Amino acid sequence: MPDKRKVFVVSNLCTGCRTCEIACAVEHSQSKTLLGAISEELPPRYRIQVQAGDDLKLPLNCLHCEEPDCLFACKSGAVSKNPETGQVSVDMSRCVGCWMCVMVCPFGAAQPDHHRGKVIKCDLCEGRAGGPACVEACPTRALFYGTNEEFRAFIEEMKQIGIIGKSA
Amino acid sequence: MNYVIIGNSAAGIGAAEAIREVDAESAIVIISDEPESAYSRALISYELAGWIDKGELTFRPPEFYTEKNIEVQSGQRVVKIDTSVNEVHLRGGDTVPYDRLLLATGGSPQKTGVKGEEKEGVFGFRTYGDLQKIYKSVKKAKEGIVLGGGCIGLQAASGLHHHKIKTTIAITSPHLLSQVADPECGDFFQALFEDNGIKVKTGVKPLEFKGGDRIETVLFDDGTELPTQLVITGKGVKPNTDLAQGTKIEIDWGIKTDDRMATAEPNIYAAGDVAVTKDRVSCESTVNAVWPCAYEQGRIAGLNMAGKKVAYDGSMRMNAADFFGVSFISIGIVKPVDAGYESHSYFSQDQKIYRKMVFKGNHLVGAVLVGIVDNAGVLTNLMRKRVDVSTIKNDLLQGRYDFAVMSKLIKDQMESFQEPEYQEIVVV
Amino acid sequence: MANSRISVDPATIKAHDHAREREIPTVWERHEAMQPICAFGDLGLCCTICYMGPCRIDPFSKEDVGGACGAKKDTISARNFTRATAAGAAAHSDHGRGVCQVLLDAARGEAKDYQISDIEKLKTLAAELEIETENVSYADLAAQVARRFFDNFGQSEGYIDLIKRAPEGQQQRWKKAGVYPRAIDREVVECLHRTHIGVDADHRSLILQAVRCALADGWGGSMIATDVQDVLFGSPKPVRAKVNLGVLKQDQINVVVHGHEPLLSEMIVVASRDKEILDYAKSKGAVGITLSGICCTANEILMRQGYPVAGNFLQQELAISTGAVETMIVDVQCIMPGLTEVAGHFHTQVITTSEKARIPGAKHLQFEEHRALDFAKTILKSAIDNFPNRDAGKVDIPQEMMDLVAGFTAENTFHHLGGTFRSSYRPLNDGIMSGRLRGVVGVVGCNNVRIPHDSGHIALVEELLKHDVLVIQTGCSALACAKAGWLRPEAAKEKAGQGLREICETVGIPPVLHMGSCVDNSRILVACAEMVKEGGVGVDISQLPVAAAAPEAMSEKAVSIGLYAVASGITTFYSPAPRILGTPAVLDYLTKGMEKDFGACWVFEDDPIKAAHGIIEHLDRKREALKLDPMMYPVKISRSA
Ligand SMILES: Cc1cc2nc3c(=O)[nH]c(=O)nc-3n(C[C@H](O)[C@H](O)[C@H](O)COP(=O)(O)OP(=O)(O)OC[C@H]3O[C@@H](n4cnc5c(N)ncnc54)[C@H](O)[C@@H]3O)c2cc1C
Ligand code: SF4
Ligand code: SF4
Ligand code: SF4
């Protein structure tokens, strides 16, 4: 069974503190430290965004879609999907900043970075020892990294211990 | 099973990849009359403009074909399809048998019909070959003219400008990007181009390409005659439908397809710039000659050719580009002709922001974004899924259309959001 | 958490291990549970001032659109900084007001248990305040001084009195910058007013008000507290004592006083010597009563009475978790509410005594100055009554304990350098001018759980001593070095560079001088002013080869102290930085701009060794500018650390 792990969101645990954004930006900085990151020439950008609805706080990053529109649209072949891990990744050396993926990602997860002329998208913190920085940073466990099954189990557990409503 | 794909570009590769997802064994042959291995023609303008390195046009790695066990026949032109014996004939006389055949032959630049079109220095802008020829002329040219004010024309002009050629864009329409944007927006880009040293001449038709063997001037219908050593024409693209002759394949400008990308001829499919499909937004049959549609159609065709039953939900008019650091995205019906539509636009010259939304009834049918293009895909998705957006219309008009805004629609219109990703997001 | 992240003090590590084994969470565990720390807050980009918010500014965003009201990050972090200063100044100054009240009550005979202990100091103060001293009773004099100081808090005209102690150079800079402090309360109030939504939005203007407020603390509230305490309880004199958790005694009743004001603790000292109380203790099976302190209360009874110190800020819970403390008596400031949780695991009772500070889970006994000694006895009795409840099985006292000498002041400290007969700052200035001493550095401040306990103080001071820097200390910082043994005269031989050592050995003082509690940082200001007055090392504090450091700063009071030190011309090395690091403009003003306005600036350096080297370079620059003699015994800075 391929190990398709990604970042899942339990939106009603999100307090909107945006710590995940900061952690993501720091992880994608040159220095990998907060103070270093904010003073870099070209500050790093985060790949997760805490979006706000009426009574919704939704941290959103790439969903690593089954049928990734971004991949279909990418005219430079920069986007690929790993058949084993399911991860949709962008080869930055190939990205030409044409924003085709931005135009089609249904979630707004592919964002234009005008300063670098390349797209910005969650890379699942590839190569990071502790796994995704955003997940590790979330103080309320609103983000979860794992497979779909693991996520369902996690949700069940959270329901059992009453952290999220059973009706949800 | 023998799969034969004519066309080694977006649609062809999309199909081959899809077939391999389903069928790891059978033979796949891709035939292309271009000598190069798969490259992205949409990037030739990027190369000309120096935005990418020369030769960086491939959109799949070199090992792609061997890894996927695909046979490619490059530089081979198919001249005929013999449906009686399920074979295609190559120009050299060889034949290739098929069980399933995909026509992913794309399109070719339309002739301008202007006198002198055959002169040296007048180019179409479609292939890597065209690009090589342009490079040769670029060295000698001081002045250049681009005939066409669409995305490709503007990119071509940026390309010539990059090579220090005094460039003029000359168009018949009254403003740039006339197919995909309003005058306001077109004028904004005109000013942007002029600020960057590229002239724009609107409302003029070329009457004649003058000179000896080589182009020397272009005469326009307003009487002006501009000296030039290089002309790039951009009249539009015509589907390469020649191969359909002598088959039952139906042509209506392009090749007519059903929702499985099948043509009227059994076992023959068509996809990409050559194919007529149903437009998701307008519901009309049309050719939407853009990369994402070509790839996706190829993919749907491939899945069906390999035995899956997958329906195509339709193509869409869309395009994205970036000119001098200003992004531009245009999706769906942006220049409605009849009264059944409702348009709203917002423009700020200072901030270099333009936004237009077009609605029909409770549906979003079109959008143009300039400057800020973040979350454009959310709008694309709203159009694509033809969901009722009445409850979030105000948000849209005010430029708020991130996923959180859209997510309000999911619960009430669950049937439109069946993909697994939506289940993941709204799980609690 | 690794022990190296906990502390560099073995007693602390042992006590913490003991708490951990019993699964008693303390500040380290709670802090760990706080992770990740919110970066917006950390960077000072979060504003909770009005109720449209909270708003926070994205440190990575392309443009700063500001909070809901339009306040950009400069405004937001300057406002937060100003509020922190105001809170710190308020804490020190309210302490000052409290002791003034007792001075007045004592003068009027309403607080009979207190008396005027240092008549000389009272007279000097009165003279300084231009109060007629001839033919006036001491009580009357004291009442007049107290009233005059009260005026300093709320007067609507004029300026605070003690600011006149500052050298002319400082006076001029302050007037030019428009920060001459008017009244103590007024400056605090004005900070709050200006930082209310929609008032001051200019970061420099805000910080200048913070400066004015901090000056009202350093040369006002804190200085008043110091001076009045000296009058009431006597000016400290060098005393020997012991420090660290080992001062707690297995066979004795352990009473720990914790907090800041000496009013009650001085009475407890008296009560604990009371025969009746001692007999009562023995009747319950204890050999005696051990009274010890934590934080600045500890410093107060240490320097005046030579009482032992149980520990500094981060050790407060650990004192309880030794299982041997009957009662911890607390008043105000730096008292962790977490204490009562820890106490809940033992027989220890935590008693709050100030009407300003009540803690859930603690017993509250309202301290009454008018019957102070009785009150102290009552508390001691209740501690004695609690002794039989002690569970011997839970007792685990780390044995670590260190000798120290404390009790130096602005008046007496440097006089030691000259010996009893030459009572002046001359020898200190001479020592600096001749290059025996590189300069004088005040290392002060708290502990901070973000930094391994005491590690910053120890590392920084050790490096300074090597380079012939005379270190003066207050607060928890002094206690950190005391535990390391550097407040013993013998430490000169062990730690000091050659020049410093010669001076220490000649005079018989430690290389690190304990100058009291946090409000006693005002003593350092006075000492600097005296150095200027003595002459030869600069005509303005900012020219002196001096500096300050707070390597483990934690409280808002520390912000106020840092700011008045810098504004008084003392460059201050401070870590961790207050929450302004997300705002280049504010950072720039504090670390550069202030140099222009005040002749000194903040330096935010988290590595204590690098900070020490920065200080040394700073002192050398000052020496060079004054064209002082080269250092007599130059030591090369080893950068390997
Ligand atoms: C300069 C330029 C810029 C563009 N920019 C964009 C853009 O920004 N965004 C976007 O979405 N789209 C863009 N496009 C359009 C996009 O490139 C096309 O939609 C896309 O390439 C269509 O792919 P296709 O596979 O259908 O056909 P094509 O790319 O046209 O490929 C056709 C293939 O068929 C082969 N072929 C044709 N006839 C025969 C035959 N008889 N025998 C053998 N082989 C044959 C050709 O060799 C070729 O391999 C751009 C196009 C150009 C030219
Ligand atoms: S970028 Fe968007 S379309 Fe692509 S995989 Fe991620 S969520 Fe899906
Ligand atoms: S912006 Fe980059 S990743 Fe996105 S479609 Fe264009 S080239 Fe591909
Ligand atoms: S997984 Fe990594 S890259 Fe992706 S959103 Fe989280 S922090 Fe950012």
Image (cartoon, coloured by chain):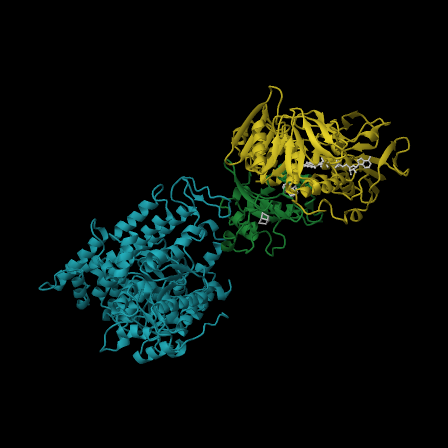
Q: Quadrant of residue C346?
A: bottom left
Q: How many marks?
A: 0
Seen in the image, is C236 located left or right of residue B112?
left
Chain letter for the cyan colouring in the rendering:
C
Is residue C93 in sight in this rendering? Answer: yes
Q: Nearer the viewer, residue A159 or C500?
A: C500
Could you tell me which residue is drawn at 68 percent across and 43 percent down? B47
Q: Nearer the viewer, residue C262 or C246?
A: C262
Colour of chain A in the image: green
Seen in the image, is C270 located left or right of residue A68?
left
Is residue C443 in sight in this rendering? Answer: no
Q: Is residue B219 above or below residue C60?
A: above
Could you tell me which residue is drawn at 69 percent across and 45 percent down? A80
Residue C579 screen position, x and y as percent: 42, 53
Residue B282 screen position, x and y as percent: 66, 25
Q: Is residue C142 above or below residue B334?
A: below
Residue C396 screen position, x and y as percent: 42, 69
Seen in the image, is B239 located left or right of residue C223?
right
Looking at the image, which residue sits at the far left?
A: C135
Q: Quadrant of residue C333?
A: bottom left
Q: Is residue C87 above or below residue C247?
A: above
Chain letter for the yellow colouring in the rendering:
B
Residue C501 screen position, x and y as percent: 36, 78
Looking at the image, which residue sits at the far front?
A: B212
Q: Quadrant of residue B206?
A: top right
Q: Nearer the viewer, residue C75 or B296?
A: C75
